[in-house]
Image (cartoon, rainbow, N blue to C red):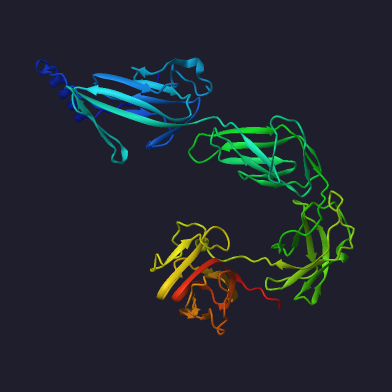
Amino acid sequence: MKKYNIKINLLMVITILAVAFTACNNDDEYEKPNTFSDVGWYVGYPVSPLPDTLLANKDNYITFSDLSQNALSHEWKVGSGNFYLSHPIQREDSIFDDKIIGAGNSPDKTVSVLFKNSGYNHVTLFNTFSEKVTFRGPDDENIEAEQVGDNWVIEKTFVVDVYDTIVPKIRIEQKGEVRNHESTTDTIFVEAGDSLEFFDETETGRPDNWSWNIAGSSSNEQNPSIVLKKLGVFAENTVTFRRAGNNIPTDWETYEIPVPIRVIPSSQPFVQFGDVYELEDETIIVPFNGEFAPFINQEQFFSVMLDGTTPLQIASVGINDADATLLEIKLSEPIYAADNITVSYDGNGTLQSTDTRSPVAFSDEPVTMFSVNLAPAEWNMEDAAQTAWISTDAPVVEYSTEQVHEGNYSIKINSSGPWARASIENHPVNITEAGSYTITWWMYIDSSTTTGSYGPWFYWADDTAGQQFWQGIRQACCGGPKPLDQWFKQTREQNLTPGAAHFTLRVNNDALMYFDDVQIVRTEARP
């Protein structure tokens, strides 16, 4: 037999007995509690507080509950085409048509509304009371009842944006001509290296994410131009539309393009196409306008030159594993960021594209050397709403789309004197190693500029006063004259010690200038 040790506080016993005695001896004084009216509601929605517009998928539901007290009358109203569902609704339920019990108005305290109409829908709670009530919600949301005759009416309408099921619709163009892919089974022929243009024309479902898989190539753009490189007949070409944005109802649908695409050998020359560039591991990438067939022992037909005069020894030439349109050249010796390197091909090799074309010779293609931009993300000019580039001279200094070197925005300085500036001083670059650094920026001088020079200020950890160097605009001194009405690159070499560094772009007198693509990199010079 179990024993339980129970301790009861004597004062507690006395208190309980006193309350009981008082209650028993005051039955004749008992009064019924006063009735009171109150208004409130609950919505089964995953976001709190409730947004102004609720979101739902078509053929799905939201549950609404009226928590009001002592209403004279009560009803829910839903728009035509939407319906009330019977309860209970199981978590695993996904089809609800068999639970429809009505439409229009409902006297039930709790209703689950099935939305059949896409777009904006309304669910309204309509209550009447014998006295004035006020709903007090989050964020100081107050809704007061209005007097109608002898009663008080409170009406709350919930707006629900209903997302329809995605119904894919696309358009295909080839060199500006629309290709029929819906009412025919005719094959679309494309030469290797050419492209097809695809356009999302979906009107129902509001997709915000796309995945195109076309003839061995892919794209995640909404309206991509896809270059086709692999030879063959491709019958399984698809695009998957998704609705995957934050806090919106999700959906996806895959559309299979019913016509096959056949990629045939190109009639165009097989040529070097695009910028030649260096990877971080010192591999040189040479892009072409088609894919290479496998090859060996082609190094002797290429040359890599330093400063146009000194040949660098090639260790290997191969095909990039991920993209067969890219040749990879590896050297037998180190290369440096400050090197001036060019690549050439004499055209005498046995290289071929996958569609049997031979590559055309090319000479002295410059290599864009790999470098790491140390500038913080705040230096990026692409967000027109950011305030990293500060100035006391706005709107003389502003983000602009009028003239852009790269991306969508640049810094515009339109000075009428005596000077104006744009500074990045609140977001310095952190220099961790002493040495030489290269700062570059691009600028555009409008021909309306009359001032003769401009003077950037550079502030380094070892020089709090900064260094200013004047640049001539129209005169021949100080690195001038500068070109007008076009983008050009400016470069500044600076020896730095560890610490924070930044600089300011300063324009004097009457000038209209744009600045873009500011970078700072460690100067890696050949020893």
Left or right position of 155 against 288: left
Is residue 112 visible in this depiction of the protein? yes
Question: Image point 48% across, 38% down: which residue?
Answer: 247
Question: Image point 32% across, 20% down: which residue?
Answer: 75
Residue 389 x %, y %: 46, 65
Q: Quadrant of residue 320?
A: bottom right
Question: Image point 19% across, 30% down: which residue?
Answer: 11
Q: How many marks?
A: 0
Is residue 424 visible in this depiction of the protein? no
Position of the C terminus, as image quadrant, is: bottom right
Position of the N terminus, as image quadrant, is: top left
Q: Is residue 153 above or below residue 527?
A: above
Observer-nearest of 515 and 268? 268
Residue 50 x %, y %: 38, 36
Residue 340 x %, y %: 72, 73
Residue 472 x %, y %: 53, 81
Observer-nearest of 3 and 42? 42
Observer-nearest of 137 and 20? 137
Q: Quadrant of residue 421?
A: bottom left
Left or right position of 21 against 336: left
Residue lying farthest bottom?
A: 477
Q: Quadrant of residue 204?
A: top right
